Image (spheres, grey):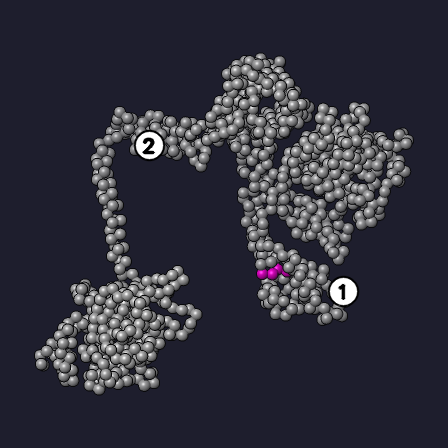
Amino acid sequence: MRIFRETQLLILRVGTLNCRTLGPPGRRGALAKLALNLSCDVIALQGVSIKADPRDFAIKDPKHHSQEMRSDAVLVLLWLMAFRVPKPGHSAKVPEPKICRSLRITNSDYKQLKNVSYLHEILSRKVDGCQFVNGDLHVHFLGSHFTGVTIDRNIYEMNTSFLDSIREVSGRVVITGLGIKRLELRNLRAIRGFIYSQSPSHPLYALEIGYCNTPTQILMPKLVSIQGPGVMFSTSMDIHLYCQLTRKISWSEVFEHKEQHLLDAVTHLNNMTNSSLKPADQANICSHLPECPDDCPMSKEGHRLCWSSTECQMVSKCRKRSCHSCYTRPTGEEECCDNSCLGGCRSFQPSECRACRSVLLAGRCAHSCRNNSYDAAYSRINTAQDSLMQAGNVCVDQCPRDFVIDSNHKYCIVECPDGQMPISGICTPCSVAGVRQGCHVCKDGFQRTLTEEFLGKFSNCSTLAPTELKFKKVLSIDGNQLRLGPLDADSGIWNLKSVRAILVEKFVIKNIPEHIGSLSFLKNLVQVSGHLFVDDCRITHFGFASLKYVSCFGLRNVRGLCARWFPFNFAAKLQDLKEHWPSETDKERSFDNTSEVCRNAVCDPQCRDECWGPGPDMCVACRNFEVDGRCYATCQEAGRYNLSGECQECHSECEGGCSSPSASECERCSNLEEDGKCVAACSSREMRADSKGRCYSVASARLLTVGIGVGLLILVLLVLLPVAYVHYRRRMRKYEIVDLDEYLTDPSNPNAMAKLLIVNDDDVMKQKEIGSGAFGTVYKGILRSSTNKGVRELPVAIKVLRGHSPKLGQELLNEASMLARVQHPCCIRLVALCLTQEPQLITALMPRGCLLEFLRAHRNQIGAERMLRWGLQVAEGMEYLESLGIVHRDLAARNVLLQTPDQVRITDFGLARLLDMSEGEFIQTAGLLPVKWLGVECFESGLFSHKSDVWSYGSRPSFRDMVGTMNDCLACPSKYIAAASRGIFSDKEVEMTT
């Protein structure tokens, strides 16, 4: 039960009260007690937010409470692990659902196609996995043609699984003329019933079913909500379908408002032996219905509800609680759904709703796509996602292809409001877009076929959206009823050149004569919300240079098209052409032009692949850059500049392009140039324009001369500074110090001897002598050390001791453990020992040398503060050596090395002797002595202690004496000893006494 020890309970919310906060649950029964508390409904663990009702785990028999504590703790633990909820912001990204516009499912072309499998294929492509229908869903005359022809059994058995992806319909669902065995909308959950066009004489309903005379079934097993006016059954209907929909379905369970109702307007029932029987007698005619499954829910009247003998109706209305929709726990208790749910839920969380009352946001129901919400489980505010937009009732990152983005970047809409136009899919105010004409939504004054008179009203229209119901379905242009003049004519059909969107169910262009040659009067057309048909035209190319979306694109009896000027691949993405080509022969006939024009037809070199006609303004996509619907090789050709792959407008004083919007970044000036900027005229009378159009003055000429001189100086400095820096780096490189512990220390061995290496003579290479003394010679050298990356050569200082005593090597080895323990910033540790005939001590190399040489080299440059700092560092190092029981015996300026000019370190422990801390002193019986720095007792009786080191430190209070006549003194130690015994220590006094 490790998790009980590691998990910390943070928050425990209990109904309307608060349970006491629990610390780390050391007892395994802590969660079992929690499960037995019948009022707890939220458990918040560290890193986990869990809503829980311990009643699901409650012990039925309280008498066995103590016996079942441990088992209940395990059950609660398993429940918590199974329902972990990730922290906000750390969950995986939920794929956005697919949204589409209104769908019309029909087999109106089945007579010509004579192929059920192909009909199924084109209907599947039309739905294309759509989940949220933003508009109406119409299923019209699917299966039978109602023309007296016997129903084809193949189409009667057709599978409608392509409709299974649909989850919600924002508008109406209209099913009429159904002639198939079964229509299944298995995942349809909500019909919002928004009425997009209303006729006073014909009220509309959210769900309408009528004229379904063929024996059929309609299955919507997951339908849980209808928000519109209600449900209507009309005209004639099959008796079995009628009885099922009126007797076995409780429509009040899916209605959201009390005003909603079922309108039964069926006048005839088919497949009855007595055709005169009216639906009012349904109590008798519906007695033959099969029973619903036993697990189906019960209606308020006491009978079970189902769509068929195997499909139950789903209900969500609360039976006991006062909330609108509920769900049932495994224990059988009824609980309320979240307020954001529509039509019930599977659990209490917003992510478990069957549909959303407001919007669906990343798999969860929310009140809006942009709002901050408080997360009670984590006690934090979740920041709004500003990048999201609302498309219908869904929050999306990007709008679907047949929508445009509103100017505030908040909503996906089907058309821009008046005074705005779609620019790159975004509704942009006309003033911002720089468009003074052709930026108006035209809704009134339409006829079914546009005549010359009406076309004159559309010269300033960007969108044609007829509001009259009778004109909204079909809008056509007939060349026989128009005066078709040249392209630059200021009347007639050329008034449509500003149109960018046509919002009708069907737009037909027909009878365009050969002298027009194309439909380029619609070159700016971007969107046709419904079907686009071109009928009986004699043209070489279409000229739809801006077309991006059309529901269906069909050709009928079109002649003279050049295949190289038609974008087959792009048009296939708009809608499969085969759907509205009666046959392959008709398709070939449309592109059978063998004239010289078509033989020489090619797309412009600036087109990427395909085009709608000749010229750089007819490309489907540009190879390089696009400006105002025309392709260019560079932005400069269009008189603009390149910014992140898009051409932007230059300053008004620029000519021939630019590199930024500033007037100082023009390719050339249209008038004059002053101070690097394009201007219309020079700013001062003293300013003059030269032959190249540049404004200048005498003062500016002088400044130019000075500027050239300064520039040359800067250039010289730019050349000299890198050279000086390289020289400085080379000079400082010789003072770099290598940390030997990084390469020589064995971290696996904590003993002090592990820090001291005993190396062979082959591993040590002496290079040059850097000093000598009474006890030996110091060399700069190399120590070869094996590392993980191979053998590394480390720079070290090697001191070769003089003397051939056989005991010297053993004494050094005995003392090595203590010498290697020295770890202080003011002391240099012994890192290696080479026991050759002349023992060699190896330490870190201090390239700056000893303090004595530094003092002599910089005699007049050293201040009192630095000298005091050195003295303090030496004192700290000696204090550390005393704590280890080490007597130095040779503390002098030559044995103090410089790591940096401000940091000194004590070295040369070759003469040091270890002193047991309990004894405090020892007697030197043999060996060389540095008499200049020793007290009288040291060379008289050979007695050394830490006190003698203090004498050595204090015998020369001024560094000035350290650079005195030490060599003379060393040449006559007997004179110094005789003088010191009389209390004379000054070099001059010693010389005077002899």
Residue indicated by mark 2: 677
On residue 280, which mark appears?
Answer: none
Q: Give the percent coordinates (x, y) of residue 335.
A: 72, 54
Q: For this view, does 432 lie left or right of residue 32? A: left
Residue pictured at 65% horizontal, 36% vertical: 128
- Packing grade of label 1 (10 A; few <14, some 14-19, many >=20) is few
Q: Give the percent coordinates (x, y) of residue 312.
A: 78, 45
Q: Label 1's element? A: loop
Residue indicated by mark 1: 60
Residue pictured at 80% horizontal, 48% vertical: 296
The part of the image, by quadrant, that contains residue 361 is top right
Residue 44 in magenta stretch: yes
Q: Nearer the viewer, residue 816 or 721?
A: 816
Q: Give the prevailing secondary structure in the magenta stretch.
A: strand
Q: Nearer the viewer, residue 448 or 437?
A: 448
Question: Image height check: is 195 above or below 55?
Answer: above
Q: Give the percent coordinates (x, y) of residue 337.
A: 69, 50
Confirm or deny contact between disc 2 and disc 1 (CB under 8 A): no
Q: Quadrant of the C terminus?
A: bottom left
**Amino acid under label 2?**
Lys
